[in-house]
Structure formats: C-alpha cells, structure tokens
Amino acid sequence: MTLTSRIVGTVQVILVEDARIDASVAIRFKDSMRALTAVAPARVILDLHKVEFVDSSGLGAIVAAMKQLEADQKLDLAGLTPGVDKVFRLTRMDSIFAIYRDLDAALAPPEV
Amino acid sequence: MPRSPLPRSDASAGAGNAASDATPERGPQGAPIYTQILPATPDCVRGTLAKVVGALRAIGLTRHATELIELVLAEALNNIVEHAYAGPEAGEISLAILRDGPRLSLTLCDQGKPLPGGTLPPPRTARLDVTRSELPEGGFGWFLIHSLAHRLDHRRSGNDNHLLIELDLDTLEC
C-alpha cells in the first residue's frame, strides 16, 4: 500500500498509488492514513484517481480515515473512477463526503 | 446431467455430501465460465478476483459489468474469509461461475460456520444521519450484494454453506 502526501497551499493532498483498496489492504490503508494525518491541516484531500476497485472493507477504511481526524478537520475525496463512484453511491456514502471530479476541481477556489 | 466434477477438500468428504448427492441439485444451469477451489485468505481472494475478471472479459462482458460482478464476488468471498472461517485456520472455498444467457450465477461453497441465525442477513442500509464518530465502518457487504444481485439463495447442508448469487447481465450493463 503506497500513499504519497504533499501540501498544496493550506491543504494536504494524499494520493493513493495502488489500484485497489480492498480487504487485504484495508487495515494497512487505515494505519497509513492515521500516520500521514497525525499532524494535518484543516483540510485533507484523498486523491483516488488511480484506484479502480474499492470493496466494502476499503470503503470502511476510508470512513475510518475520516473518523480518525479531529472534529475540525475534513476529508474530501477526488478523482473517483466509475466503479469506485458506484460503491459510494450504492451505499449512500456519497452523502457523507464532499466528492470532486478530480484534484484540480477539489483545489479550485469555491465559487462565490 | 451429472454434477460438475469439482474436486473436494478432505474436510468436505463427509456424510453431508452423501446426503446432498442423494437429492437432485436445484443448482444453476449454464456454461461454465470459471471454477476454482481457493484457500480462504484475503490474498487468495484477491488473486481469484483477478482471474475471474480476466475470464469475464474474455467472454465479452463490458468493463462496467465486470467491475460490479467483481464487487459482488469480493463481498461474498470476504464474508466467508472473515466470518465463516473466522479463526486461525483457513479453510477452503469452492467457486463456480456459470452463464445461462443473460444470467450469471456465482456458486460458493464453504465448510465454515453457519450464517448467524442460519439465514441471509436482510438488505439494510446503514444509518448515515449520525455524528461522524458514529458513522458505520462496516456492514456494507451484504447490502452491496443485495443491491446488485437478481436472486440470492443460501442453504446449509451438513457442514456446508452453499450460497448462490444470480446476476442479471442486462441490468448490470446499464
């Protein structure tokens, strides 16, 4: 499980380099996210554009990564591929996260 | 039609099979797409899913339908790994995938624990109108299976769990 983190302005961007967040890596994903966001700014964006498959364990791990943050921090998602997007919509988890088409859209200043 | 000659693990070669052999199978019909016996571990599940995806693409299913079938199969296999065989010793899972026109059937057999209550969990959606700390981190698996399956059937015979998941390919292609 490879996650890379960088700071863009005041935002932390975490890119998932793997094609799958599934049952065999869910715990590692959760632990890596905890380590990477231990000292995090108020907004973290998880860039999922390389991820082609998320199962229910992976979905649970993404939810857990959000719950690990402090109450005043938020985790947004960007770049969901069609299959991953479907999992979020079927489980209605798309109502819990702010989801952006891609990282550029997530980093764009909010429209007034 | 004779039963498909799936090899059996030693653990399953008991009286339970004699009983099930005596009754006609009401199992799925169709052309075999993929069969495998796999050890019930997360890594083996992952390897099997990759092979199944290849087999489904090879018979001309779209990428979209294949992704959804992979998801359903992943949830069913993970349930067996994590719950039926919960414990230090991994058992085995028999998997058979058959196609009959627009119907694709996934048949899974294991020798693990019975389902809680002996029956399939109901299709329930998790409550999301809760605070962040109360959000569910699990329980999505059966919901996804129910959402995508055309028909589900489970039975316990002897020490075996049999799960049949029937998928409608026309619906999945949409």
Image (cartoon, grey):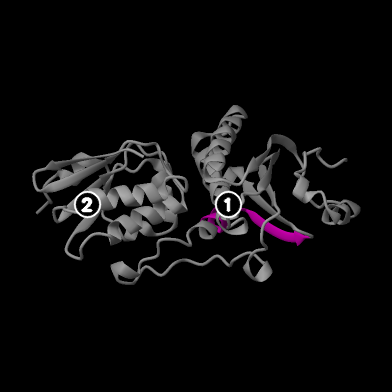
**Residue at image location 66% in from the left, 66% down from the top:** B119
The verdict on a common chain for dots 2 and 1 is: no
Left or right of B90? Residue A9 is left
Q: Is residue B77 magenta?
A: no
Give me the disc on residue B81.
Answer: 1
Report the residue at 31% width, 61% height from top: A96
Numbered range of the magenta stretch: B144-157
Q: Quadrant of residue B96?
A: top right
* Secondary structure category for the residue under label 2: loop
**Can you name the residue that lies furthest to the front here?**
B88
Horizontal and vertical percent position of residue A12: 17, 46
Q: Label 2, on which residue?
A: A37
State the residue at coordinates (8%, 44%): A9
**Residue B169 % position (x, y):** 60, 43
Q: Quadrant of residue A48?
A: top left
Indicate the amino acid at tag 1: Val
The amino acid marked with disc number 2 is: Thr
Q: Which mark is on residue B125?
A: none
Q: Is residue A77 left or right of residue B38?
A: left
Q: Residue at x 62, y 47 (%)?
A: B168
**Camera-side residue of B6 and A76:** B6
**Disc 2/disc 1 C-alpha distance (Å):** 30 Å
Indicate the position of residue B114 as horizontal and vertical percent values.
67, 63
For disc 2, the chain is A
Q: Is the residue A81 above or below the residue B109 in the image?
A: above
In the rendered image, the quadrant that contains the N terminus of chain B is top right
Q: Are marks 2 and 1 in contact (CB under 8 Å)?
A: no
Regarding residue B106, the answer to whether it shows in the image is: no
